[in-house]
Image (tube, grey):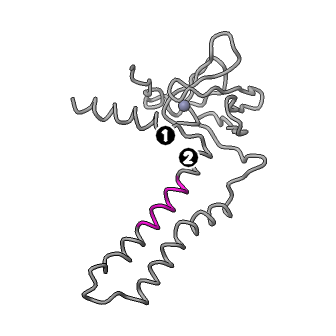
């Protein structure tokens, strides 16, 4: 597997401002790892890493994900992508608060219960409340992280695979 070309924005030209056009190559707004470039003979972009396909609105410098049911759109400001607020389902601060509460509240309750009703010193299961508190925290955290990954359609497994390959490649 060829290494993704990722040296574009590391040179001295990184400060240059470029407009969005089908002749250009841009970093991928979805995986932030690959690069998107025009699909030959089509007015569309494709990522060389996560394989998502995008359509562009060049007048408004907008890029829209074409192969997703989610209406994901980004604005090209000349240097990088800016996420646009999504019409419909929005991840606002309320959803963020709900996610934080969902992760923190249950382990807090379990932990408080363990704190106020401590087990006897010689209890062979005295480790259990701490273990249970930690387990509650991690299961709820996993739920939220998974929802975020699903929401953004982040190609987590492809990303981890390439990451691992690069790490292993550097050691050799
Ligand atoms: Zn990508």
Where is residue 76? Give x, y as percent: 66, 35
Please tell me whether residue 148 belongs to the stretch shown in magenta.
no
In-image side of 122 versus 102 (left or right): left
Quadrant (top left/top right/bottom left/bottom right) for the N terminus: top left
Q: Are marks 2 and 1 in contact (CB under 8 Å)?
A: yes
Locate ligand 1 by image quadrant.
top right
N-terminal of the pair, mark 2 or mark 1, is: 2
Dot 1 corresponds to which residue? 156
Please tell me how crowded label 2 is: few (under 14), some (14-19), or many (20+) other residues with Cα within 10 Å: few
Q: Label 1 crowding class (10 Å Cα cut-off): few <14, some 14-19, many 20+?
A: few
Q: In this view of the protein, which residue sits in the foreground, 99 or 84?
A: 99
Looking at the rendered structure, the secondary structure element under dot 2 is: helix
Res 25 → quadrant: top right
Q: Outermost residue, top direction? A: 41
83 or 109, which lies in front?
109
Q: Which residue is mark 2?
A: 149
For the stretch drawn in magenta, what is the main secondary structure? helix
Question: Residue 117: x percent and y percent?
Answer: 42, 89
- Where is the C terminus found, in terms of image quarters? top left
Q: Residue at x 58, y 50 (%)?
A: 148
Q: Bounds of the magenta span? A: 135-145
Q: Residue at x 26, y 80 (%)?
A: 124
């Amino acid at each position: 597997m060829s290494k993704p070309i990722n040296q574009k924005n590391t040179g001295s030209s990184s400060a240059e401002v470029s407009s969005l056009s089908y002749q250009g190559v841009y970093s991928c707004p979805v995986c932030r790892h690959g690069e998107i470039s025009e699909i030959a003979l089509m007015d569309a972009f494709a990522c060389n890493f996560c394989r998502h396909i995008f359509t562009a609105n060049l007048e408004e410098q907008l890029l829209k994900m074409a192969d997703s049911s989610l209406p994901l759109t980004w604005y090209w400001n000349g240097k990088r992508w800016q996420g646009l607020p999504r019409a419909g389902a929005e991840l606002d601060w309320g959803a963020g608060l709900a996610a934080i509460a969902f992760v923190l509240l249950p382990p807090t309750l379990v932990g408080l219960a363990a704190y106020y009703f401590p087990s006897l010193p010689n209890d062979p299961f005295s480790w259990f409340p701490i273990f249970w508190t930690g387990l509650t925290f991690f299961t709820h955290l996993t739920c939220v992280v998974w929802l975020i990954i699903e929401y953004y359609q982040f190609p987590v497994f492809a990303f981890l695979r390439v990451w691992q390959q690069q790490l292993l490649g550097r050691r050799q």
